[in-house]
Amino acid sequence: NIGNIRFIIGTIAFSLGESYLFPQMELLLNKLSPDNLKATYFGAIEIRQIGFFLGPVCGGMIYHEYGAICLFIFCSIFLFLISILYMKQFFKMLIKI
């Protein structure tokens, strides 16, 4: 079945990309953090693990209660707001450089 082959190829491609990109954040953090605060920075970056738990739980609850369209709208709005906050911080950092 062509659908299964596409799914397997997509899963392999996603897994390879993920296995490459996840360690990159730690490498970048190691380069950017001062020596006396490395442990603090690495501890703070692990807060993202909360998102790996809360994302599927909250998404599943929204999907179950309100349906797929509402979940899509909620995720779109949330992504838009996070993008604005990210860009705001990015431009602050860019101005300092």
Image (spheres, helix red, strand yellow):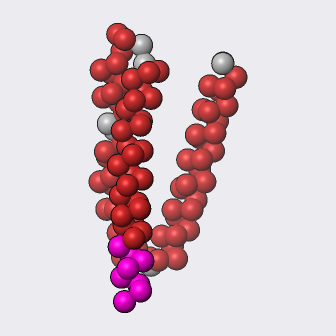
Identify the residue at horizontal 37%, vertical 89% (top origin). 1
For the residue pair 38 and 81, the one nearer the viewer reads as 38
The answer to whether residue 42 is left or right of residue 68 is left
Q: State whether residue 48 appears in this view.
A: yes
Q: What is the quadrant of residue 58 in the picture? A: bottom left
In the rendered image, the quadrant that contains the C terminus is top right
Image spot of residue 24 (x, y percent): 41, 37
- From the top left corner, tell me how far across and down residue 57 is, in percent: 31, 62
Task: Identify the main secondary structure in magenta.
Answer: helix
Q: Going 42% across and 69% down the picture, which residue do you hit? A: 10
Task: Identify which residue is drawn at 33% across, 27% down.
Answer: 42
Vertical relation: 87 (above or below) 72: above
Compared across the picture, whether 71 is left or right of 92 comes to left
Q: Compared with residue 7, is residue 30 higher up or lower down, i.e. above or below?
A: above
| Residue 76 on image: x %, y % | 57, 62
Q: Which residues are magenta?
A: 1-8
As drawn, 55 above or below 89: below
Percent coordinates x, y for residue 82 in the rendering: 55, 47
Q: Is residue 55 visible?
A: no
Decide whether residue 20 is among the magenta residues.
no
